[in-house]
């Protein structure tokens, strides 16, 4: 191959998303919009025949790309090149194709349709990810693990409770996504500056027919409404709002992937590993979290890419300028392709994530004695009748000594042995074991997990059944 091909298509995105932003999808949608326009104009009294419309419908998908490319070289306009190409295939309909419309009629409406289709695909993948993380949280809701603040040992939690943090982010993303899907509207047919002047002339000043034309086209293209006002284009804030949702999903995925990368370093978890996988990631002691790294990498691209429509929306002049076109042709499709890959990877990683409970327990037990000192002190005061100040000083002294053994000598944490041997505490092994029961240190982690799954996640999944095939062609 002697020319550049986007890695998003070659390596990462799924077939369905690639199709949504393919030339075939784009240009067949243009033709469907021209048909919807002709049908609507006919219904409102314009002299267009059934034969012309039937001819157009017969040639929706047989696009002569070579002819279109030749015409674009001549006319320097992609829409008009395709008008000419469609007209060549439909000689009877040629005079009424694109009647009264501007290039943004097919361009902008198709952009909206592609974004909606893309969001529906993302929706299906997001629901699958939510379901997989929920299963993981349920499975490990009671497994204690060391929790961190500032990446320093803090207090125990459970593996399932930690997973609810990932899950909560995805649930918020889903709700934002639903809002964006439901709020998308078509541009409709607003004309050169958004005044619909050409259509008002076409319908001889009948404002009601001009307005009805918008609603008929929207209905034929599967939308309930069009934007009430526009310039030549729909507001470019629409693109920004859509990519903001994709950016939010990328943020959630990055948080998840970073946690997996850290857990991999701690030898507590390992992402899926193929039997024939080779390279440094294949070493038994060094299973690199490559898929999580790929999630982080692609998500970073999406997060920065979301600035493109923000700048574009901010810099449009009056009713439109063309500095949006080249940018949005790249920034919008690539954001969708990248998030498609990110969610597919997320599903793959969480679905095959392997935990090492003994390593989780080892790391927790190394730090738990330090965290348990307050519990030990209170037990010895309340049950043993010990002197609080004397006990506090003994705990401080033993903790400092045990920390030195761990940090300076690389030894095991011997704090509990020191406390058990000190008569000021007066503890038996059974008493100390009871105080050190890890369930006393995880707070409401398990019940919080159960409540979140029962009250939020399962109702959401039950109310939103999704198509399982959306995640079936995952590239990992």
Image (spheres, grey):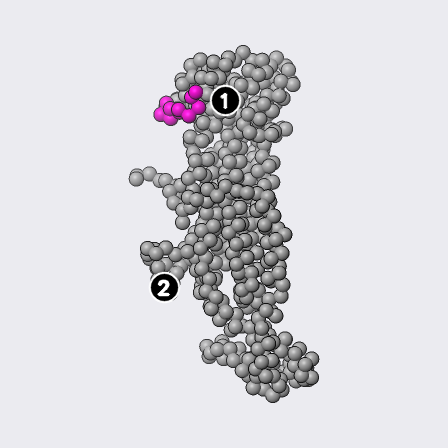
Q: Quadrant of residue 18?
A: top left
Q: Residue furthest top?
A: 47
**Which comes sooner in the sequence, label 2 or label 1?**
1
Q: Position of residue 471 (x, y in %)?
A: 46, 44
Residue situated in front as seen by the camera: 248 or 303 = 248
For the stretch drawn in magenta, the main secondary structure is loop
Residue 113 position, x and y percent, is: 52, 32
> In the rendered structure, which segment of residues is drawn in magenta?
58-68
- The front one of 318 and 472 is 472
Query: Where does label 2 land, which residue?
Result: 284
Instruction: Report the side of 98 relative to 216 (left or right).
Output: left
Q: Which element carries disc 2, helix, strand or loop? A: loop
**Is 357 positioned to the left or the right of 155 in the image?**
left
User: Can you identify the residue that label 1 sits on?
Assistant: 34
Where 165 falls versus 56 (above or below)?
below
Does dot 1 land on a helix, a strand or a loop? helix
| Residue under the point 57% across and 38% down | 181
Residue 403 seen in the figure: yes
User: Which of labels 2 and 1 is toward the front?
Assistant: 2
Would you place residue 356 above or below residue 461 in this image? below
Question: Which residue is at the far bottom?
Answer: 423
Residue at the location (40% across, 17% down)?
Answer: 88
Residue 322 seen by the camera: no
Q: Position of residue 209 (x, y in %)?
A: 62, 18
Nearer to the camera, 405 or 436:
436
Question: What residue is at 51 percent from the left and 73 percent from the top?
Answer: 366
Residue 238 placed where, x, y %? Answer: 57, 36
């Amino acid at each position: 191959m002697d020319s550049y091909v986007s890695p998003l298509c070659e390596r990462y995105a799924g077939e369905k998303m690639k199709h949504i932003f393919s030339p075939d999808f784009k240009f067949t949608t243009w033709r469907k919009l021209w048909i919807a326009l002709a049908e609507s104009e006919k219904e409102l009294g314009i002299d267009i025949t059934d034969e012309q419309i039937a001819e157009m419908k017969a040639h929706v998908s047989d696009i002569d790309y070579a002819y279109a490319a030749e015409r674009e070289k001549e006319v320097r306009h992609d829409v008009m090149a395709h008008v000419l190409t469609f007209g060549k295939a439909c000689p009877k309909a040629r005079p009424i194709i694109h009647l009264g419309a501007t290039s943004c009629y097919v361009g902008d409406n198709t952009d909206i349709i592609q974004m909606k289709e893309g969001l529906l695909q993302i929706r299906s993948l997001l629901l699958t990810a939510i379901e997989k993380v929920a299963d993981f949280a349920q499975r490990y809701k009671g497994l204690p693990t060391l929790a961190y603040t500032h990446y320093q040992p803090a207090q125990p939690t459970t593996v399932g409770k930690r997973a609810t943090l990932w899950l909560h982010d995805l649930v918020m993303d889903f709700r934002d996504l639903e809002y964006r899907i439901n709020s998308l509207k078509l541009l409709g047919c607003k004309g050169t500056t958004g005044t619909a002047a050409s259509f008002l002339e076409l319908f001889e000043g009948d404002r009601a027919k001009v307005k009805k034309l918008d609603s008929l086209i929207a209905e034929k293209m599967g939308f309930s409404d069009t934007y009430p006002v526009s310039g030549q284009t729909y507001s470019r804030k629409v693109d920004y709002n859509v990519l903001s949702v994709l950016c939010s999903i990328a943020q959630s995925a990055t948080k998840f992937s970073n946690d997996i990368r850290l857990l991999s370093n701690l030898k507590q978890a390992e992402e899926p590993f193929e039997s024939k996988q080779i390279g440094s990631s294949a070493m038994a002691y060094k299973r690199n979290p490559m898929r999580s790294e790929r999630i982080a990498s692609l998500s970073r691209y999406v997060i920065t890419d979301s600035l493109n429509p923000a700048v574009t929306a901010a810099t449009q002049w009056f009713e439109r300028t063309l500095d949006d076109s080249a940018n949005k042709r790249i920034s919008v499709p690539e954001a969708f392709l990248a998030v498609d890959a990110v969610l597919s990877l997320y599903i793959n990683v969480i679905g095959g994530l392997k935990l090492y409970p003994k390593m989780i327990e080892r790391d927790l037990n190394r730090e738990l004695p330090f965290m348990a000192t307050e519990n030990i002190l209170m037990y010895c005061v309340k049950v043993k009748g010990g002197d609080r100040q004397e006990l506090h000083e003994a705990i401080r002294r033993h903790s400092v000594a045990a920390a030195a053994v761990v940090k300076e000598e690389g030894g095991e944490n011997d704090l509990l042995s020191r406390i058990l041997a000190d008569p000021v505490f007066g503890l038996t092994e059974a008493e100390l074991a009871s105080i050190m029961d890890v369930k006393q240190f995880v707070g409401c982690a398990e019940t919080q997990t159960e409540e979140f799954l029962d009250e939020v996640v399962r109702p959401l999944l039950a109310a939103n059944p999704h198509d399982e095939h959306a995640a079936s062609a995952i590239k990992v």
